[in-house]
Image (cartoon, rainbow, N blue to C red):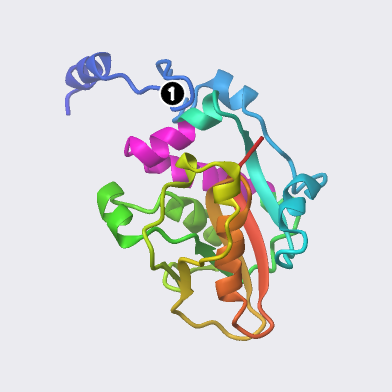
Amino acid sequence: MKRWIYDFFNLLYPELCVGCESVLTTGENLLCTSCRTHLPLTNFHKTSDEKMRELFYTRIDVQHVTSLFYYEKIGAVQQMIHQLKYRKKEEISSFIGSWLGQELIECDLFMDVDVVAPVPVHPKRLKKRGYNQVAGFGNELAQILNASYRDDILVKTKNTINQARLNQTQRSDESNNPYQLVGSLPQGTHVLIVDDVITTGTTLVLCARALLSISDIKISIATMAISV
């Protein structure tokens, strides 16, 4: 493409920040400098993960847990996740995975992970969206942690109501597990389950319980964001 055509195309369709929708400038990728600087990082893996870990007390035993961002109902993180899930911005998933992965290799906590497994999406929802929104996130983490990415271990057998539409009590319902173990792993495997936003932790608990039928398995958890 000739340079003048490329420049004209960019004038008509400028690349916008996925956090605030301002026009990106040279050297910026997906996020503008202002959004990247002010995104609310949790730093759980560097300091203390107790805020996130307390979601799993008495429910499942987890090795390590972390989340990259705090998620608020209004803000750049919410805008990013919305664009990832509903506006076909699939590249956001890999972007966040690479960011968190670089953070994790600096603290060594997750370096013994063997397998990275995404929370599965029901086939009907997968067909409608075209991709699992945490696939890129999980793939990036697997590469950086020198682990295997396995999206064939768990399946979602029931197309449950979108978690965003449920109240806190409904989100915490663990009475009916829609996730089923279909693949196999060696005993003692350390699995990192990944998801986009954690609120009550129920989705991750149910996925972990399906995996815990494998003898001596270890579970860790990483998400893009944690709801505040």
Q: Residue at x 44, y 40 (%)?
A: 92
In the image, 195 versus 199, the foreground residue is 199
Classify residue 46 by image quadrant.
Answer: top right
In the rendered image, the vertical position of residue 22 relative to residue 71, given as above or below = above
Q: Residues within 10 Å of mark 1 (few under 14, many from 20)?
A: many
Give the percent coordinates (x, y) of residue 85: 39, 41
Secondary structure mostly seen in the magenta stretch: helix
Q: Residue at x 48, y 25 (%)?
A: 19
**Residue that mark 1 sits on:** 17
* Part of the protein shown in magenta: 80-103
86 drawn magenta: yes
Q: Residue at x 44, y 27 (%)?
A: 18
96 drawn magenta: yes
Give the percent coordinates (x, y) of residue 223: 59, 49
Q: Residue at x 72, y 52 (%)?
A: 55
Give the percent coordinates (x, y) of residue 213: 59, 81
Name the kind of residue labelled 1 in the image.
Cys
Quadrant occupied by the N terminus: top left
In the rendered image, the vertical position of residue 177 relative to residue 87, given as above or below = below
Give the percent coordinates (x, y) of residue 84: 41, 39
